[in-house]
Image (cartoon, rainbow, N blue to C red):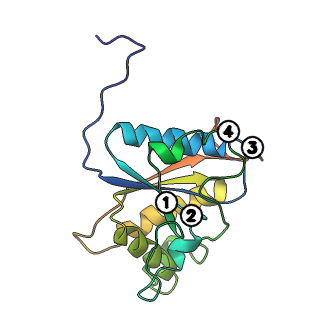
Amino acid sequence: MANSLSRPEQPAHNFKRVAILFSGGPAPAANAVISTAAVSFLRAGIEVLGVMNGYSNLMQFGDDRPMEEDRDYIVLDHKALSRSRAKQGIMIGTARANPGKAISHPDHLKDKERCSAFQTTYDALNSLGVDALISIGGDDTLKTANKFKMFQDTLPEGSKKMPVVHLPKTIDNDYNGIDFTF
């Protein structure tokens, strides 16, 4: 039996790169949460990208606007994270852009036009070689994360699927069924 204070065993995974994005309004401790999540992945040998300004840059991706380091994303390595926890603002920015805005019913996931922002987001993340997405935000961002997962469920057999993990953030304490947020 391991010492209760020892680091837990690392679960088996095949992730090489994850992306973290922060969406919606700002909240205290944002950089501490981003940094802690990133360090957890780095310790497991997984590269971490910080998506700049929520979903907004992902939604602008296209042949004429490929994802560009330092404009659309940054590499979150130990050097970039050094002393970041106490810095003001949000190190990767935030925005209220929402690729799931046009989807309000499960049937809408069958409509290519309604899903076009999700397709663009998915393509942008794939262009970066992202294996999983960490979403940080409020209740609207939680819904977007869920819709993005559901969108991926509609992709053709054999398509890459990116797990989506949402870290709840609220200053309104309006998460029904989630007792702890930051």
Q: Nearer the viewer, residue 36 or 169?
A: 36
Residue closest to the far right: 172
Task: Name the front one of labels 3 and 4.
Answer: 4
Task: Name the front one of labels 3 and 1.
Answer: 1
Q: Amino acid at mark 2?
A: Met
Q: CA distance from mark 4 to mark 2?
A: 19 Å
Mark identifier at residue 173: 3
Q: Amino acid at mark 3?
A: Asn
Tell me the crowding category of disc 4: few under 14, some 14 to 19, or many 20 or more residues within 10 angstroms, Cα based: few
Which badge, 3 or 1, is on the more N-terminal residue? 1
Tell me the crowding category of disc 3: few under 14, some 14 to 19, or many 20 or more residues within 10 angstroms, Cα based: some
Quarter of the image for the C terminus: give it.
top right
From this view, report whether residue 149 is shown above or below residue 112: above
**Picture residue at 50% right of the left edge, 64% below the top:** 73
Which badge, 4 or 2, is on the more N-terminal residue? 2
Q: CA distance from mark 3 to mark 4?
A: 23 Å
**Picture residue at 24% right of the left edge, 39% below the top:** 12
Mark identifier at residue 86: 4
Q: Amino acid at mark 4?
A: Ala
Mark identifier at residue 26: none
Q: Nearer the viewer, residue 12 or 73?
A: 73
Task: Name the front one of labels 4 and 2.
Answer: 4
Q: CA distance from mark 2 to mark 1?
A: 7 Å
Q: Quadrant of residue 159?
A: bottom left
Which badge, 3 or 2, is on the more N-terminal residue? 2
What residue is shown with label 2? 52
